[in-house]
Image (spheres, grey):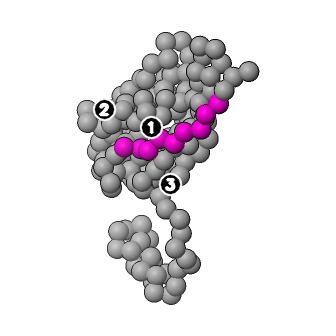
Amino acid sequence: MGDMELKTVKIEKPEDMNFILGQTHFIKSVEDLYEAMVNSVPNAKFGIAFCEASGSCKIRSEGNDSDLKKLAEKNAANIGAGHTFIIFMKDCFPLNVLNSIKNIPEVCSIYCATANPTKVVIAESKLGNEIGRGILGVIDGFVPKGVENKEEIAWRKKFLRDIGYKL
């Protein structure tokens, strides 16, 4: 019988940087994710890394910003779960690209899209010389501190209008 261990991996990134973490299933995913980013927000800067789950089991990466590409590679290596991808971005938000990414045929799921401090919950299994890792979920941000009051509702509505997401 094999052994399984639960681990958490902290996403390493600048405090206000957004990223998307998901699962996909095919070697061409990194190229399709690149195209989705470029076609959604042409001026965005980003780095993508994808953990191949079979064959040579390499971390495949692309991007138009070398620092973000290295950041994606580092976090993908830390997570080390097959068929997962991570995208770090500047000059755009997940909101701008998420639907394009979800519409890529080989994308299976999105675990999170956030700038919050994030931990990835990993299961690692060992059977003989075979080691596999999978993402069970994510811990995105912090525990709620109550229900918003009238002033906080007003602040939220004003904020969304101030940044141009509502009329």
Can you tell which of label 1 and label 3 is closer to the viewer?
A: 3
Which stretch appears magenta? 4-12
Give how far across and how far down residue 48 sits, in percent: 39, 34
Which secondary structure, mark 1? strand
SS at circle 3: strand
- Tell me if I can see residue 121 in this picture: yes
For the N terminus, give its image quadrant: top right
The residue that label 2 is drawn on is 70
What residue lies at 55% left-to-right and 27% top-to-bottom? 82
Residue drawn 45% across the image and 77% down it: 157
Residue to which mark 3 is pinned: 140
User: Is the magenta region chiefly helix, strand or loop?
Assistant: strand
- For this rendering, which residue is in front, 21 or 107? 21
Alpha carbons under labels 1 and 3: distance apart: 15 Å
Identity, as a three-letter code, of the amino acid under mark 3: Asp
Residue under the image location 37 percent in, 68 percent down: 164
Q: How packed is label 2: few (under 14 Cα within 10 Å), some, or many (20 or more)?
A: some
Q: Amino acid at mark 2?
A: Lys
